[in-house]
Image (spheres, grey):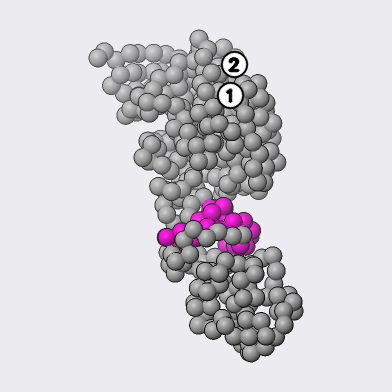
């Protein structure tokens, strides 16, 4: 097949959430845009996110405190210029039904396919060219131009946007393409690790399937949300959120019962109450049985027979249990990757590289990781809007 040679205004690599939105915004001013992806379909991560319903934004808004980055203020500019309400308005105009869940999380009512349908509809412009199944792309830089090519296509452009995301879910084609290119032009890469991911913790497999609200502290961050016991350890929203702040080897502190203290429980019962039955009023029986087994304390003891040392031990294990995850369940189970292209040499206003003029980075490829709850997609929409505003 003869290679097609093209010259255009803007090339975007990655037809995911940020890439498709960027193409729409960049094309508004009449510029010609090519958007390339090695996958056969757009938005593959969108389709499987949120259990197939896509938590596309958060009704309460996104703030720098909802993001993890070496530069905590980097997200402020883009987020301030594209609010969740603008994406909600896009959904409403396209008659896409959605629902609010806990903590302002917005999900599609029918399917995440609705998001892809909306984003694809915005690409139906004569100056936007979507090219899928474009594998093995290589980028070369000569003077002030970028040359993007593979065996099928060769494109020359003055403006190149990298929107190919992180390395989570490699089974659907995620790659380190953006990191390699950024490093090539001199950008520092913050080590990339799995985030919003379950923990592997030994000793709880017998409780698999149980879930309840617990308070978790990790590196100064406190999360009180549902924790789910699995065959491998702990999961659920409380754990996924905590994993954003965890580094290998760190301990976590768990308050299994944040709603009431042991002291208050003891005040409410008579001395001839079994201590395990007292706690079983608040926590699953199987958890309480294992809890006392781990402490090597007889749960059938009456409250009146507990020594001060026993009470202190129960209190510490119930409200301040220290656990050290052996690891996370890795990129295969992670919602996102933490780390990426360091933002110190990237403009927070235009998302342009300060080391290579004309090169822009948006979405998850940057060292910006949103907390669970729609914040990562909101960063995709906002960073796409920012780059579009700069280039159109």
Q: In the image, what residue occupies the spot 42% across and 54% down?
A: 329
Decide if residue 379 is in sight here.
no
Quadrant where the N terminus sits is top left
Specify few, some or many for label 1: CA neighbours under 10 Å numbering under 14, 14-19, or 20 or more: many
Q: Does the magenta stretch include residue 217?
A: yes
Which quadrant of the figure has residue 150?
top left
In this picture, residue 370 sits left or right of residue 146? right
User: Which label was assigned to residue 388?
Assistant: 1
Decide if residue 66 is in sight here.
yes
The residue beneath circle 2 is 28
In the orientation shown, which residue stands out farthest toward the left?
A: 1
Distance from the alpha carbon under mark 1 to that under mark 2:
8 Å
Specify few, some or many for label 2: CA neighbours under 10 Å numbering under 14, 14-19, or 20 or more: some
In the orientation shown, which residue stands out farthest toward the top?
A: 126
Label 1: state its secondary structure: helix
Quadrant where the C terminus sits is top right
Tell me if residue 146 comes above or below residue 187 in the rendering: above
Q: Is residue 108 magenta?
A: no
Could you say where residue 221 lies in the image, as x and y percent from the top left? 62, 59
């Amino acid at each position: 097949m003869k290679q097609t040679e093209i010259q255009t205004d803007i090339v975007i690599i990655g037809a995911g959430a940020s890439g498709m939105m960027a193409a729409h915004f960049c094309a508004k001013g009449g510029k010609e845009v090519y958007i390339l992806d090695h996958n056969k379909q757009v938005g593959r991560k969108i389709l499987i996110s949120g259990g197939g319903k896509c938590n596309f934004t958060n009704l309460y808004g996104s703030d720098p405190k909802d993001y993890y980055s070496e530069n905590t203020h980097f997200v402020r500019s883009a987020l301030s210029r594209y609010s969740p309400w603008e994406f909600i308005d896009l959904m409403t105009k396209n008659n896409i039904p959605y629902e609010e869940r806990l903590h302002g999380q917005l999900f599609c009512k029918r399917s995440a396919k609705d998001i892809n349908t909306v984003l694809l509809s915005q690409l139906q412009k004569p100056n936007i060219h979507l090219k899928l199944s474009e594998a093995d792309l290589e980028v070369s830089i000569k003077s002030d131009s970028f040359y993007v090519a593979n065996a099928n296509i060769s494109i020359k452009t003055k403006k190149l946007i990298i929107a190919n995301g992180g390395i989570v879910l490699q089974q659907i084609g995620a790659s380190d393409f953006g990191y390699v290119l950024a490093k090539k032009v001199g950008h520092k890469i913050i080590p990339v690790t799995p985030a919003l991911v379950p923990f592997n913790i030994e000793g709880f497999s017998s409780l698999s399937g149980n879930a309840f609200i617990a308070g978790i502290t990790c590196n100064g961050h406190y999360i009180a949300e549902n924790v789910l016991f699995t065959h491998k350890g702990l999961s659920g929203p409380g754990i996924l959120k905590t994993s954003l702040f965890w580094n290998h080897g760190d301990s976590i502190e768990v308050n299994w019962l944040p709603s009431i203290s042991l002291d208050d429980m003891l005040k409410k019962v008579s001395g001839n109450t079994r201590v395990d039955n007292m706690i079983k009023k608040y926590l699953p029986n199987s958890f309480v049985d294992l809890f006392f087994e781990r402490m090597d304390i007889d749960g059938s003891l009456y409250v009146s027979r507990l020594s001060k040392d026993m009470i202190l031990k129960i209190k510490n294990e119930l409200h301040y249990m220290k656990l050290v995850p052996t690891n996370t369940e890795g990129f295969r189970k992670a919602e996102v990757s933490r780390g990426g292209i360091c933002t110190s040499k990237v403009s927070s206003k235009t998302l342009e590289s300060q080391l290579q003029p004309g090169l822009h980075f948006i979405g998850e490829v940057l060292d910006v990781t949103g907390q669970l709850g729609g914040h990562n997609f909101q960063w995709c929409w906002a960073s796409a809007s920012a780059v579009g505003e700069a280039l159109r």
